[in-house]
Amino acid sequence: MKDYLIRGIVPSKNCRIFACATTNTLEKARQHHGLWPTASAALGRMMSASFMMASMNKNNEKMTITINGGGPIGTMMTVTNGDGNIKGFVSKPNVHYTYNDTGKLAVGVAVGNQGTLQVIKDMGLKEPFTGSVPLQTGELGDDFSYYFMVSEQTPSVVSLGVLVDDTNEILASGGFIIQLLPEATEEDIVYIEEKMKGFPTVSALLHEGKTPQQIMRSIFDDFSLLDTQDLDFVCDCSHEKMEQALIAVGKTELEAMIEEDHGCQITCHFCNTKYDFSEAELIKVKESL
Ligand SMILES: [Zn+2]
């Protein structure tokens, strides 16, 4: 199955729906960053939530989400502008924890819960929109649900999941968000709560071959699809962009790179691609200052 996102509505239950399959996107991220399973689960959950949140934005604004819960994985970041492309990283890709009782990947342990989930939306205006909430569990589904409640006053069910093979390959990744519209009734809320009790994990359903639409139809009989969007892990870095970063380094630092190292290598945080600059290139950058 290719990666894609769906948006839809459920007229009878007064809610709107976002759901996505991100297995290939996460596998690509895993290969770029060398993610260990729990790091894959954390970044995968975050990327699924980021895609769905970006599809809620009206003007395809650039959206940056940063999470740091003080756990061993360090800072996590995703950037997307609602076009279906995402880039992202975690500071420490080589973390792996499981829960003793269930054997499940311990995302909450890797991420930690002493920190914040921050969302920045840049609409090209003077000031970008910034929203931030304290992390609740670090499991991320709970944390995004809390963000929607506190920052956007929208009650939401957020389900995010990643399944990793023994070989560390990604078997399934995806998620869904159910958001109650203002006209939702007490009965609508009770219906959704009842449906969610004992509901299988979204990663298990995707791994069985269920599509996002099929998962939504198993919850709501009258789920109505509005649109779909293809998803991919794509970084927009280039040799030219990295050269801009070198300009920001400043003259003294550049001189040191030229005289001591006779060149330099810059790594893109978002995709781990390495860019080499020769001594001659560095001299050109220095002279352009
Ligand atoms: Zn890059």
Image (spheres, grey):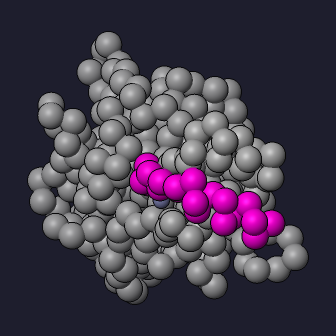
At x 86%, y 70%, the residue is 127
- Does the magenta-highlighted stretch encompass residue 275? yes
Q: Position of residue 78 (x, y in %)?
A: 54, 55
Quarter of the image where one finds residue 20: bottom left
Q: Number of marks in the image?
A: 0
Q: In the picture, which quadrant includes the N terminus?
A: bottom left
* Residue 110 drawn above or below residue 284: above
At x 57%, y 53%, the residue is 279
One can see residue 113 in this view: no
Q: Nearer the viewer, residue 100 or 76?
A: 76
* Residue 198 drawn above or below residue 150: above
* Residue 159 drawn above or below residue 98: below
Q: Nearer the viewer, residue 171 or 213?
A: 171
Q: Nearer the viewer, residue 276 or 138?
A: 276
Horizontal side of 220 relative to 11 (left or right) equals left
Horizontal side of 267 relative to 6 (left or right) equals right
Q: Position of residue 157 (x, y in %)?
A: 49, 54
At x 58%, y 39%, the residue is 261
Q: Position of residue 66 (x, y in %)?
A: 63, 48
**Magenta span of residues:** 270-289
Q: In the picture, which quadrant includes the C terminus?
A: bottom right
User: In the image as oriented, which residue stretches furthest toward the top?
Assistant: 100
Quarter of the image where one finds residue 169: top left
User: In the image as oriented, which residue stretches furthest toward the right?
Assistant: 126
Q: Position of residue 81 (x, y in %)?
A: 56, 74
At x 45%, y 65%, the residue is 235
- Does the magenta-highlighted stretch encompass residue 286? yes
User: In the image as oriented, which residue stretches furthest toward the left?
Assistant: 208
Horizontal side of 151 relative to 211 (left or right) equals right
One can see residue 91 in this view: yes
